[in-house]
């Protein structure tokens, strides 16, 4: 599957060869190419760091963690920490309708896929975490599906759907989160049985959504389920 990603950057680059401004700091760029950021802003991007726990976002080793929800995942990667400027760009895109924010995040994600092709080698299908149909109507798009809509990548939007409307996970304890999301998803056995599935979401905060969707896919017969997120929330100012 990795070979498919080689042309992503080249194709995106051809579309916008004009001068422009850095999206992060408004520095003039004589030749603005994806991801439309100056070198300084690229260097300051909050890439996910070793030492921060993926399960809970605190700075400690996974073996010291009280959270065990990641056990349902066969692998888990975060591209960035959910801090500014990634948090700001994503929220401008999701809640403010700023399409440039979305375009930049897509280009950064394309870079990451290009740089880590080995992480996709054994993946049979890529599944953006589905939204409930009502949410889709409200927002107009499914954010993870939009971010993954890259040349050469073939996400499988129909392999699972969200069948239950859920309230925000913020402020809920783990038992309440489980109840809130219980049976929230349904998967299509014809598409997932025996497959290695890679979930993709824009943000992971509590992990409850990825946990419930991974459980659903495994109950439906998926062979393995891993997850990538654009950004994982961190705790304690990391
Ligand atoms: Zn800049
Ligand atoms: Zn932890």
Image (cartoon, rainbow, N blue to C red):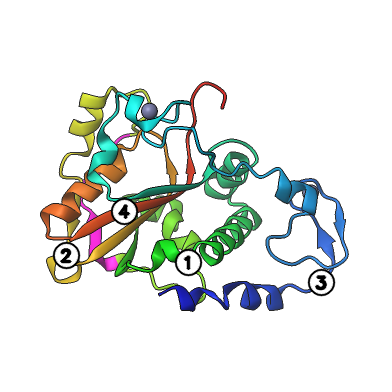
Determine the CA span between mark 3 and mark 2. 44 Å
Foreground tag (2 vs 4)? 4
- Which one is earlier in the sequence, the residue at label 4 or at label 3? 3
Q: Tag 4's secondary structure?
A: strand
Q: Tag 1's secondary structure?
A: helix
Determine the CA span between mark 4 and mark 3. 38 Å
Residue for badge 2: 188
| Residue in view at x 52 percent, y 48 percent | 94
- Which one is earlier in the sequence, the residue at label 1 or at label 3? 3
Determine the CA span between mark 2 and mark 4. 17 Å
| Residue in view at x 79 percent, y 54 percent | 38
- Which one is earlier in the sequence, the residue at label 2 or at label 1? 1
- Which one is earlier in the sequence, the residue at label 2 or at label 4? 2
| Residue 166 appears anywhere in the view | no
Image height of 82 relative to 197, above or below: above
Image height of 120 relative to 48, above or below: below
Residue for badge 1: 117
Q: Is residue 172 left or right of residue 111?
A: left
Are discs 2 and 1 less than 8 Å apart at CB? no
Residue for badge 3: 18
| Residue 212 appears anywhere in the view | yes
- Residue 218, image x and y in percent? 16, 54
Question: Which quadrant is home to the C terminus?
Answer: top right
- Residue 91, image x and y in percent? 56, 42
Residue for badge 4: 226
């Amino acid at each position: 599957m990795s070979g498919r990603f080689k042309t992503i950057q080249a194709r995106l680059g051809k579309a916008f060869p004009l001068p422009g401004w850095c999206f992060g700091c408004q520095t003039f760029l004589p030749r603005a190419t994806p991801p439309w950021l100056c070198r300084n802003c690229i260097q300051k991007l909050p890439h996910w760091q070793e030492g921060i726990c993926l399960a809970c976002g605190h700075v400690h080793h996974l073996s010291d963690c009280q959270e065990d929800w990641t056990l349902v995942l066969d692998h888990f990667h975060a591209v960035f920490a959910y801090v500014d400027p990634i948090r700001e760009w994503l929220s401008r895109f999701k809640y403010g309708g700023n399409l440039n924010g979305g375009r930049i995040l897509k280009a950064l994600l394309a870079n990451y896929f290009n740089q880590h092709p080995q992480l996709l080698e054994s993946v049979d299908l890529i599944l953006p975490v589905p939204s409930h149909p009502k949410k889709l109507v409200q927002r107009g798009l499914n954010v993870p599906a939009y971010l993954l809509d890259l040349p050469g990548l073939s996400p499988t939007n129909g392999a699972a759907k969200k069948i239950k409307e859920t309230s925000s996970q913020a402020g809920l304890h783990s038992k309440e989160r489980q109840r809130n999301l219980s049976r929230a998803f349904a998967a299509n056995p014809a598409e997932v049985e025996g497959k290695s599935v890679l979930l993709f979401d824009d943000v992971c905060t509590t992990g409850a959504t990825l946990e419930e969707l991974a459980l659903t896919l495994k109950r439906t017969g998926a062979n393995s389920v891993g997850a990538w997120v654009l950004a994982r929330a961190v705790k304690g100012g990391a």
